[in-house]
Amino acid sequence: MTQACTLPEPQAQAPDQERALEAALGIWALIEAAESLPASTETRESLGRARRVLNQHLQRLGWDEGFLRELLAESSKREEPPGFGPFSGVHG
Amino acid sequence: MSAFVQNRRRLRGDSAGMAELAPSEAELAELRRQMLAHAYTRVPPSDAEDTTQDALLRLVGDRRPTTEKLRTRGFRKLKDVHAERFRRRQNQFEADAEPLEEVAAEIAPQEAMISIIALEEQIAAEAGIEVLQYAKSKAAGLTNKELAADSGWDPNRVEAARKQLSRKSEAIARAIEDSEPLDRREA
């Protein structure tokens, strides 16, 4: 008599990745939006350094600014996956 | 040396000159039983027979004169064999282990995900969630009017978020700068 073998449910890894992407998107958007506002030279320089550091984070994650830009553009078309729209709620 | 003296010494298991005598089969069988029982408590069962046999062969092959009891010598040989096996396995484990850089590369994404999430939470705590939502809409190219329509915020709330971003830009930039990944700082 054979016994049915129940495989364990695969561990869901996607939410972590989604959450990280959402966080990266938010930080990148902050730099973009802040740079579009009037600011002192010092603040602009700080934002430039911050962008470089963000790029290092993105590099470690295997993403880049172009990817985030595309993702944000897509999300603004209201066809965004849950969690990625500007008003989807930053912390769920 | 008479057979009588040899047997007495053998039974006592000590005395000078005993190493010159080959242990009897009965002595070896009894010693083997004891060593095997001990080996089962020290190594995996699949290894116990092998290590005991190895130790016994070494014991029999060791012709150096000694005053130590047969049992003491046997257990010392067994201890040596177990120690050698342990060292061999440890060396093998170290040789098989992935180089640190490869392990680091594998765990980096998880660590990087945690870092970026922590940074965003820090910024949200510093500047407020609405600033993040405002920034995403602006970065997506929405005008304030579109943003208000999209979010349901009234124009004053949109303007408040803009002002807050302007006020907090420097602090946000510093928080991001301070979050520079450690591996990059050292490079």
Image (tube, coloured by chain):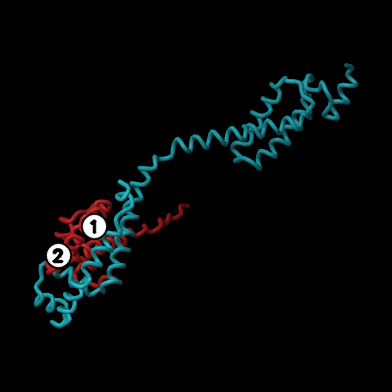
Q: Residues within 10 Å of mark 1 (few under 14, many from 20)?
A: many
Circle 1: element type:
helix
Please state the horizontal and vertical placement of residue B187, each as a whole percent of the image. Answer: 30, 46
Front position in the image: B178 or B80: B178
Q: Which amino acid does label 1 sit on?
A: Leu
Q: Which chain is cyan?
A: B
Q: Is residue B7 above or below residue A43?
A: above
Which chain is rendered red in the image? Answer: A
Identify the residue at image location x=64%, y=34%. Answer: B49
Chain ID of residue with mark 1: A
Lateral position of residue A60 relative to residue B136, left or right: right
Q: At which x and y percent is residue B19?
A: 78, 22
From the viewer's side, name the closer residue of A36 and B118: A36
Residue shown at the point (42%, 57%) measured from the top left: A6
Q: Mark 2 points at which residue?
A: A35
Up/down of B7 relative to B161, above or below: above
